[in-house]
Amino acid sequence: MNNRGQTLIVFILLLPLIGLLLAFVINEGYVYIAKRALASDVKEAINYRFKLEEDDEVIYDKIQNYIYKNVDNISFLDIKISNDYIKIITSINVKAELPMIIKRNSFLITVAYEGYISDDKVVIIKE
């Protein structure tokens, strides 16, 4: 008995599922990389805040400029600054790499971090 036809049919039926799984993995990989890059930029902005010795309004403008220069496609940015405290919440849109397969054109990524000084060290925590 010959099983070549059965194997070919099973392969043809599984091929679209393999393609969908591969597209999902690629898109999630790009989203993960974008989220890590955004988190890194926000942490750098928090560290930058504690290097500055100016009043809160000037620091706010400098932090905002720093983030807009380093992060693309910002859809939301909220910065709260007090004496030795800063909180940054930002969202970006990441374009899907394979939108025709997963029916989604972009992903919204939101990151929120707080920073403060404790025992002369900068502490950054994820909210």
Image: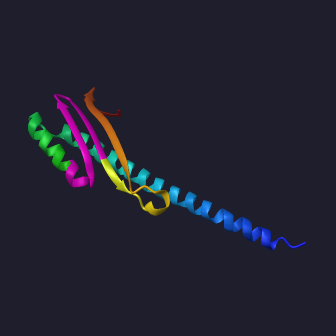
Q: Is residue 76 above or below residue 118?
A: below
The residue at the far top in this view is 119
Front one among 34 and 120 = 34
In the image, taking residue 4 as reference, residue 26 lies left or right, namely: left
Task: Give the residue displayed 17% in from the left and 29% down from the top.
Answer: 82
Residue 48, given in percent of the width and then of the height, sits at: 21, 43
Task: Give the residue displayed 11% in from the left and 34% down from the top.
Answer: 56
Picture quadrant of residue 118 = top left
Picture quadrant of residue 110 = top left
Residue 71, given in percent of the width and then of the height, sits at: 26, 53
Q: Is residue 114 above or below residue 105?
A: above
Q: What colouring style does the render use?
A: rainbow
Task: Give the residue displayed 68% in from the left and 64% down from the top.
Answer: 13
Front one among 64 and 3 = 3
Residue 3, given in percent of the width and then of the height, sits at: 83, 70
Task: Give the residue displayed 22% in from the left and 38% down from the top.
Answer: 78
Front one among 119 and 89 = 89
Q: For the N terminus, give its image quadrant.
A: bottom right
Q: How many marks?
A: 0
In the image, taking residue 78 as reference, residue 125 lies left or right, namely: right
Front one among 32 and 95 = 95
Q: Is residue 54 visible?
A: no
The residue at the far right in this view is 1
Does the magenta run of residues contain 14? no
Residue 64, given in percent of the width and then of the height, sits at: 17, 45
Magenta residues, start to end: 67-91
Does the magenta run of residues contain 85? yes
Q: For the C terminus, give its image quadrant.
A: top left
- The secondary structure that dominates the magenta segment is strand
Q: Is residue 110 visible?
A: yes
